[in-house]
Every structure is written in structure tokens, then in C-alpha cells.
Image: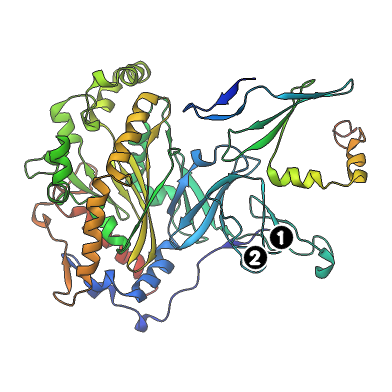
Amino acid sequence: MTATVSQTAMPPAATDRPDYAALIQPDRVHGSLYTDPRIFAEELARIWYRTWVFVGHESEVRQPGDYVRKSIGPQDVVMTRDRDGRVHVLLNRCPHRGNLVCEDERGHSNSFRCPYHGWTFRNDGELLGYPYHQGYGGRGKLKQGMARAARVDSYRGFVFASLADDGPTLREHLGHAAGEIDRLCRLSPEGEVELTAGWLKHRTRANWKLLVENETDGYHPQFVHGSIFSVTGSPIGALYSEKSVAVTRDLGNGHSENDLRPEFRRHGQPMRWFGTTEDRVPDYVAKMREVYGEEAEKILVEGAPHVMIFPNLFIAEIQVFMIQPLAVDECVQHATAVQLKGAPELNRRMVSQSIGSVGPAGMLLADDTEMYERNQLGAEQLRPEWFEIKRGVHRERLDERGLRVGNATDETGMRGFWAHYRKLMEVGK
Amino acid sequence: MTDEQDGRGVVIGPAEPEVVGSEFAEVAVSVDHQGNGPRLKLEDLRTGHVRYLDALELETIAWLPDEHLRRLLDPSAHRWREEA
């Protein structure tokens, strides 16, 4: 038998709790949301240990017996693939005396042996045995396995876990954001994404929400990333100008996107989304046309999504980020290059572009991280107490799906994030 | 023997397996690198049946008492059982 871990205990009585309705208003949010350790503790209980959280990708544990160390916020978890091909998410803790069971970042083993007293577990968490069994009255007397995430599910290979026994299904949680994952997958001639390029980790002294808000903030690129745009001659900056026809969309459930397709359609050039032209990646373009037929032009012109999936999965066209909060003022950004199955020509470029933008000496993520850390320091100052989130509120409209959209530089995504955040934090009020 | 390379050209091990054979059985032995870590690949060359063994499983076999191994060698232990 294997225990499942679930977070069912509610935080202290409502009277002791922050008043989220007062802290989160339609056009502004209170600075303490980024600095109060008590609020961070509530976020762990109400968001990170309840809702669906992105853990990793099935391609990272391709073979039965493969495992990788991952996280759900501060929780250290192990994602495994068992002999039957099923993916599991185990909490990395021996049920005997609490030792960390797996230390390597990745490996191959069908069973795990705790180094402290030798308790041994199958890679689905089941206890296989323990040394000197007579001390427990014999063999097979104990049933304590490693704890498993209560629910594990995947969408197009992206693995999510929830530590709550109940709640919306993954598909319900993803809602309209699922279509953005589809949009990424269709860029592969085989319709599949792989996250096998390895992960970079950037420790960041900032509250996790500053990152989530920034991921679809179309207002900052022209300022924060001005230097890399000018050095590289990138056309990306113009996508986020006041003249841009791109939109910012609230996808619901806290998800948001910068939908750049209107701009790319206006130009109608295949591979412009990747900052290149089709003659530079002839094999890829030919393969896409062969596989997708007439649909290929649309796919090659519209490109990849730029979507923030609540609370921690950010797909930034050619990179995937996983945001891991560790404390109220600290998190880790995990970043990897998207790899498209059946597209080696593009994959090589995606890795080198990712090194240039989010690698150790990359220019894009370093710019953002500088802002995150300055933002955290600023948030700790006493006055004024509020953060503005009202940009473009007067020009928001609903699209054909009934989703709220704003202009390219508007804070529509942030407002959607905070509405969902408030709903989760007020549960049990 | 040429070295096996992965998709990026990194040498990851010998390509040709060694064969441990006798008049009773022939098994190809190699170290497989397709997973997130190495594992031993055993291929029964008479049937094509493949068994992978990870490090902890190999250590366990290294410590298997002769008596236990003798029981496994009984043809009716696993492979040739009436109910199989």
C-alpha cells in the first residue's frame, strides 16, 4: 500500500486570516501580497498544495525505470515511470525517519533504497522491504510506502500533479490554455514536444507572483529588453508597442497570454515568429508542408504561444519555464529549450537561442531577473502601499470566445491572474 | 569494436555486445544508455527475450545465495510451468 498525500486541512479560522477582498482590488493589489510570510504560507496550502501544478514532461522519463527530481513549490518530488509505463510523482522522503531518498537529479532505477536504514521502495512508492525484519515482527509487516501526489495527470506530455484528492480535473483547470499547448505541439511535424535539452536553474530573490505577472506583461519589453533588441536587431520589440495589433488575453483560471498572431498574420511570413526566414530552415519547413498540407502555412506564420499557465508553467515560444517558489521573497526559475519531435534543424537553433536568452550569460532572463529583484526590494518599502494593475482597463473587450482581451501593452493578464488567485485564497472564508 | 554514439555524437559505450555462451544458452550482454542512467541489457539470443537490470537489481543478484539461484534454475520455476 502506498500513502497518497493530500492537503485537506484548512488554515486557521477566517478571523485570523488576511482580508483578500481588501488586498486585491480590481485596479490595484496590496504590496504585502509580495512580502508577508503569512500570506506565502497560505498560498502553499491553498494554491501550491491544492491546485494542479506543472511538474515535468513525459519525455524526461522515457524509459520504464527512469526518474527525475522535480518540485511542487518547496516540496522535493521524484517523477518516475514504472514498469507498466505509468508516470508517478512521489514525495522525496523516506516514511521511516524522513530521509531524502533520491539525491541525483536524474537516473535509472526501478527501485529506490534509502541510504539511512536501507528501506527499499518500488518506483511507484510501494515499500518492498526493510533490513533485519524481525525488529518489525517479520517480513511484509510494514506497509508504509513513499507518499504519492494524490492526483497525477498529463496533457500532451506535460505532467501536472495535485496534492488534493479532489478538485477540478486537469482538463478543467487548463480550460482555454490547453489550446495553447496544442498550438506548441502542432509546430512539430510529429505533433509532439520534448523537454529533453536539460534545465537551467536561476535562483531569484523575488516573490513568485512578480514573475507570473511579468510573463505576459507586454508593457515592459521595450524598456527592460531594449538592449538585447537593439544588439540583435530583433523585431520582437515592435510586437509590444502601442501600434501593435497583438493582444493580451485573460484565458480564465488565472492563465493569460500575449497573442502575437495578429502581428504575424499581418506580415504573413513563415518563421518570422522565430526571428528567421524559411530559407534558413528548409528541411523543417519542407517537412511541415509535407505533413500538414495547406494547414502548414498558417502554422508556420502564427508560430508558438506565449502563455502563462497558472501557477507555474510559462511557455515562451521556444522556451518552457517552471517557476518554483521557496519563500515569500525567493524562488527558482527553471528553464529549458523546447524541442520539437522530428525537427532536428529547428531544435539546434532553439537550444542556441535559449542559451543566448536564458543561459548563464543570456541577456533576456538576466534583464527580467534584475527587475524581479529590484521589484522585491521596492515592494518592501512602506509607501505607497499599492501595486497598480489598471493599465488598459478602459479599452478591454471580449473576443469571439467571450474571453477578455486588452491591447498588447495592457495589464489584462495580471487582472485575470489576481481574480483567480483571490478566488482560491478566499476558499473557506 | 566501434563506440556507440548518442544523437549528439557523444560516445556512450561499446556498440557490440559481448556474448556469454555455452552449448545450453547464449546471452548478449551490453550496457544500455537509452534511459536516464545506465542499465545492463541481457538478450537471450535464442528467443530474442530482453531483460534490463539496473544497478540496485545487479547488486541484489550479486548477493543472491547459491541456493536461491538454484531454485530459479529449475525449469518449472518460471518459464516452463504448466500454468504459464
Residue located 77% across and 47% down the image: B60
Q: Chain of mark 2?
A: A
- Cβ–Cβ under 8 Å for marks 2 and 1: yes
Residue A335 placed where, x, y %? 37, 46
Q: Amino acid at mark 1?
A: Trp
Q: Which residue position is annotated with label 1?
A: A119
Q: Secondary structure at mark 2?
A: loop
Picture colour scheme: rainbow
Above or below, A252 against A142 in this view is above
Instruction: Give percent across and percent down for residue A255.
Output: 30, 51
Q: Residue at x 24, y 45 (%)?
A: A363
Q: Residue at x 78, y 22 (%)?
A: B47
Q: Report the residue that reaches farthest toward the front.
A: B1
Q: Position of residue B19 (x, y in %)?
A: 76, 23
Report the quarter where the C terminus of chain A lies: bottom left
Three-letter amino acid code at the position of disc 2: Pro
- Whether residue A13 is visible here, answered yes or no, is yes
Residue at 17% x, 55% y: name it: A411
